[in-house]
Image: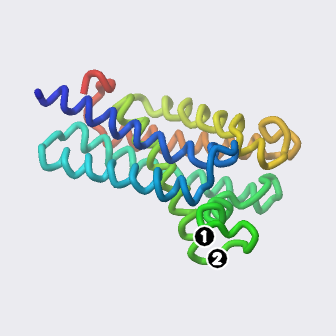
Amino acid sequence: MDTRKSTLILALVVLAMAGISPNLYPAAMAGYGGMPFFSKWLLIPSIVIILGVFIFAKKQQLTTLSRRIWVGALAGIIGTVGLEIIRIFGFKMGWMPGDLPKLLGVLMTDRFMKGPSTWSNILGYAYHYWNGAAFGMIFTLLLGRKPWWIGIIYGLLIGTGFLLSPAVNAMGVGFMGSDLPGMIPVVYTAHLLFGSILGYLAYKWLHNNGWLLNM
């Protein structure tokens, strides 16, 4: 198999695995399963596969692929730091219905009736930041090096997807969170900042301008 075809196949594998993590919480809220089950049988294997592909790509000198994976993951994590600044501010102001990373940790450890613990908080925040990494990898693998403002559009699309997801519906805050004043602006501002950081860092750190099919 030639290098270009190998790169494309491996990139599609990473895209599929990266798409798992952000959909687990909405799927759980839609009643398709529980977060403990999803975490054990879907989240952890998807992370292991992505790491395996990255290591393989490095060893095989598939430079474009390996670089897009780590740049996307790192830029997504840094972008999540920016998102968290806005989210935490919104939560402290009462504009968000809950502390989402802590809620994720409670659901992952099946502690909904007991409340958060140190371990559940660690897992919840780790999952939250991994979602940022996953969205970052999807961005860099699909688009490569594009003008930074493309990241803003991408971030706003993610924010819209979140507001329309079963996760928000399960919170009981109305359509797209409209019953809670401030939630929609907080979500969009947070994701706008996430997308800005992701787009800027991807543009700064990547050297290949090609789309996925041109890797």
Left or right: 56 in relation to 146 = left
Q: Residue at x 63, y 57 (%)?
A: 85
Nearer-the-camera pick, 200 or 101: 101
The residue under label 1 is: 121
Can you say whether 67 is above or below 36 in the image?
above
Q: Position of residue 139 (x, y in %)?
A: 43, 35
Compared to residue 169, the image places residue 40 above or below, namely below
Find out whether the residues at labels 2 and 1 contact each other: C-beta distance under 8 Å.
yes
- Dot 1: few (<14), some (14–19), or many (≥20) neighbours within 10 Å? some
Q: How is the image coloured?
A: rainbow
Marker disc for residue 108 = none
Secondary element at image label 2? loop
Residue 82, given in percent of the width and then of the height, sits at: 56, 53
Give residue 117's mark.
2
Left or right of 103 on screen, residue 38? left
The reply, left or right, for residue 187 in relation to residue 179 is left
Residue 180 appears left or right of 124: right
Crowding at mark 2 (Cα within 10 Å: few <14, some 14-19, many 20+): some
Q: Position of residue 30 (x, y in %)?
A: 69, 42
Q: Label 2 sits on what residue type?
A: Ser
Q: Residue at x 19, y 32 (%)?
A: 6
Dot 1: what SS?
Answer: helix
- Occupied quadrant, residue 1: top left
Q: How many marks?
A: 2
Mark 1: which amino acid? Asn
Q: Residue at x 34, y 54 (%)?
A: 48
Q: Quadrant of the C terminus?
A: top left
